Amino acid sequence: MVKIGVNTFGLGPFLHQNANSVWNGLKDSGVGVIEPCVAIHRQPPVNAEEKAVWAKGILDGIYDLNQAEDLIRSLRMMGFEVFSFQMQAPVFSLEAVSQFIPFMERLKLHYCIYSFMERSVTAMRMQKETILLAAELLRTHDMELLIHNHNMEWMPDEGTCVMEWLLAEIPSLRFEIDLGWTEYAGINSVNILKKYPDRFPLLHIKEIAKGSRAWTGKPFCTVPGTGILPLQEILDTAKTMPLNEYAFIIDQDDSVSGNIVADISMGVQNIHRMIR
């Protein structure tokens, strides 16, 4: 049976209330992989403003390096796989990536995932050398940099868009494609998977409710298989791709139903039903 993963972003409020209940509920529903969001933070927080930012991060399901290390060890003891994480850093730099390498080595993590949240091709062009250097640095440690997208990376700019520019200009670079944000941007995600079958070892399944608007502060995510994603076509296409063993990672920012854990559980059932 396919092992399905879950990203920790969005789970924060439920983890804050009762983390054990969340982890046990996810495991019982068939989730086998956890992908944490991990941030660089000064330790300990030194002023009220920093404490406020830190508190918000915890509630969003983002952990600092020390917390993430303890979390990952605990998750593995519970039977979860952890092989990737989303890197949260103020800016993308070689220095920032370097800070995560000892953490990755200790925990035997393979994928370091970063999201630029950038629609400007010019801005990405200025980052190209840093991306190449960071990717090579990780490669020397038998690790890999993956880029994660939001909807803005698909917005037209300079006759292309950030995602298409990255795919064309850095052919060695691979991605953790967020299929929900791709569809939300008006891009046919199935066509993208077919066009670049070797570039996406991990697939983020973010299900956005039909008719919902993101970035408004209101919930917009729903049960995978019931929103804008052509999930059956995605899963059928995935069978033809050289994906990572645990490629399917549910990534819900929130829940229009108010219960993201229940949404994920139903989504896992839908994926298992569709993938047979």
Image (cartoon, grey):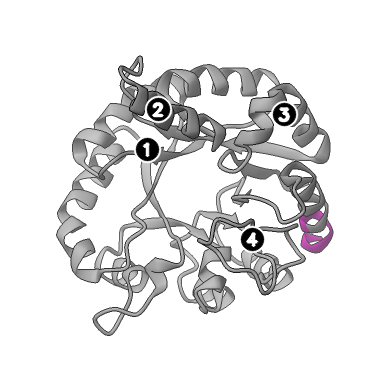
Residue on which the image places disc 3: 23
Name the residue located 74 percent from the left edge and 70 percent from the top edge: 232
Does residue 251 appear in the picture of this structure?
no
Extreme residue toward the bottom, this view: 159
Nearer-N-terminus badge (4/2): 2
Q: Is residue 21 positioned above or below 191 on the image?
A: above
Q: Amino acid at mark 1?
A: Met
> Which label sits in the foreground, 4 or 1?
4
> Which label sits in the foreground, 3 or 1?
3
Checking the image for residue 220, the label placed there is 4
Give yes or no for contact between labels 2 and 3 (Cβ–Cβ under 8 Å): no
> Which label sits in the foreground, 2 or 3?
3
Give yes or no for contact between labels 1 and 2 (Cβ–Cβ under 8 Å): yes
Q: Secondary structure at mark 2?
A: helix
Name the residue located 58 percent from the left edge and 38 percent from the top edge: 8
Nearer-N-terminus badge (3/4): 3
